Amino acid sequence: MPAISMFDVIAVKTLPDYWLFLTFENNEQKRFDMKPYLNGTAFQPLKNVGFFNLARIDYGTVVWSDDIDIAPETLYQLSI
């Protein structure tokens, strides 16, 4: 099984329709669609656009609060 590449997120910008514009430590820039995750219990507060727009970087990934974050490997592997 090949190794999973993971790069820390170093910048995030929220975009309309629950998209994230991400910059990774290898300087790649990608877009990630959060819409498929919004019905999950942990991510439901993000349906509030004002809260969604509070996305920030902490510990190499995107976080919204102490309770809501998303794994950097998910962001890297599933972004376009």
Image (cartoon, rainbow, N blue to C red):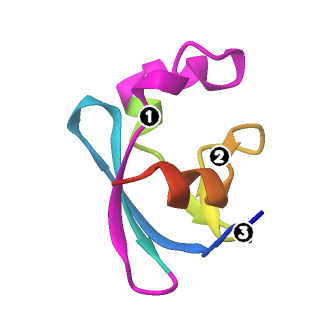
**What's the residue type where badge 3 is placed?**
Pro
Mark pair 2, 3: CA separation: 22 Å
User: In front here: 55 or 61?
Assistant: 61
User: In front here: 26 or 49?
Assistant: 26
Q: Which quarter of the image is occupied by the N terminus? A: bottom right
Q: Residue at x 67, y 45 (%)?
A: 69
**What's the residue type where badge 2 is placed?**
Ile
Hey, which quadrant is residue 49 in on the image? top left
12 magenta-colored:
no
Instruction: Please indicate whether residue 63 sits to the left or right of residue 10 in the image.
Output: right
Q: Which residue is mark 1?
A: 34
Whether tag 2 and tag 1 are in contact, CB under 8 A, the answer is yes
Q: Which residue is mark 3?
A: 2
User: In front here: 2 or 67?
Assistant: 2
SS at circle 2: strand
Instruction: Please indicate whether residue 17 sits to the left or right of residue 8 in the image.
Output: left
Q: Which residue is mark 2?
A: 70
